[in-house]
Image (cartoon, rainbow, N blue to C red):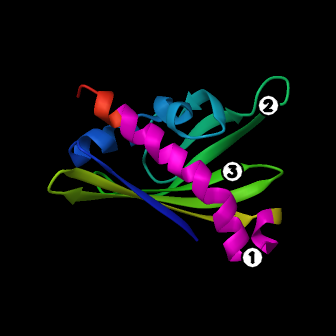
Amino acid sequence: MAVVSKDVPVPVDRVWNVLADGWTYSAWVVGASHVRKVDENWPAVGSGVHHSVGAWPLVIEDVTRVVAATPGELLELEARLWPVGAARVRLELVPTPAGTRVVMTEQATKGPATVLPRAVQDAMLKPRNVETLGRLCALAERRAD
């Protein structure tokens, strides 16, 4: 399971507000190039962000769905990229004296990546997820809620 974390000097609610705004998804998720639609009840369990991955003309359209959500604490997603597969992504928000620690955990759940040894999966996912958390935290720092 690939686990990365980043501290950001803003309150938990500022980070949560970025996560709760599905239209920001392509701004912080590495690889997502365009958000086509956000379900009205996002980030309720079962709701989705309908997104595109890749650069034109090699674009795949898919959806990421909420598996679990606790406002201000946790957002767990099933991120799909069919036919490549799917992954479970967990974002935990932990209050710290200086702001928020964001902990991101990702594990392949469907597709070819599931047969790779865990160490190989982690080596592939961690650099991408470090960048993803950097983008998420930068958005939270700039957000004026």
Sequence-wise, the earlier of marks 2 and 3 is: 2
User: What residue did someone put label 3 on?
Assistant: 80
Q: Three-letter amino acid code at disc 3?
A: Arg
Q: Quadrant of residue 101?
A: bottom left
Q: Three-letter amino acid code at disc 1?
A: Pro
Sequence-wise, the earlier of marks 2 and 1 is: 2
The quarter of the rendered structure image containing the N terminus is bottom right
Q: Position of residue 142 (x, y in %)?
A: 31, 27
Q: Which mark is residue 18?
A: none
CA separation, marks 3 and 1? 20 Å
User: What residue did someone put label 1 on?
Assistant: 117
Q: Is residue 36 magenta?
A: no
Sequence-wise, the earlier of marks 3 and 1 is: 3
Q: Main secondary structure of the magenta part?
A: helix
Q: Is residue 20 in sight in this rendering?
A: no
Crowd tier of the residue under label 1, counting other residues whose Cα lies within 10 Å: few below 14, some 14–19, many 20 or above:
few
At numbered mark 3, what does the secondary structure look like: helix, strand or loop? Answer: strand
- Span highlighted in magenta in the image: 113-139
Residue plotted at (24% across, 48% down): 12
User: What residue did someone put label 2 on?
Assistant: 59
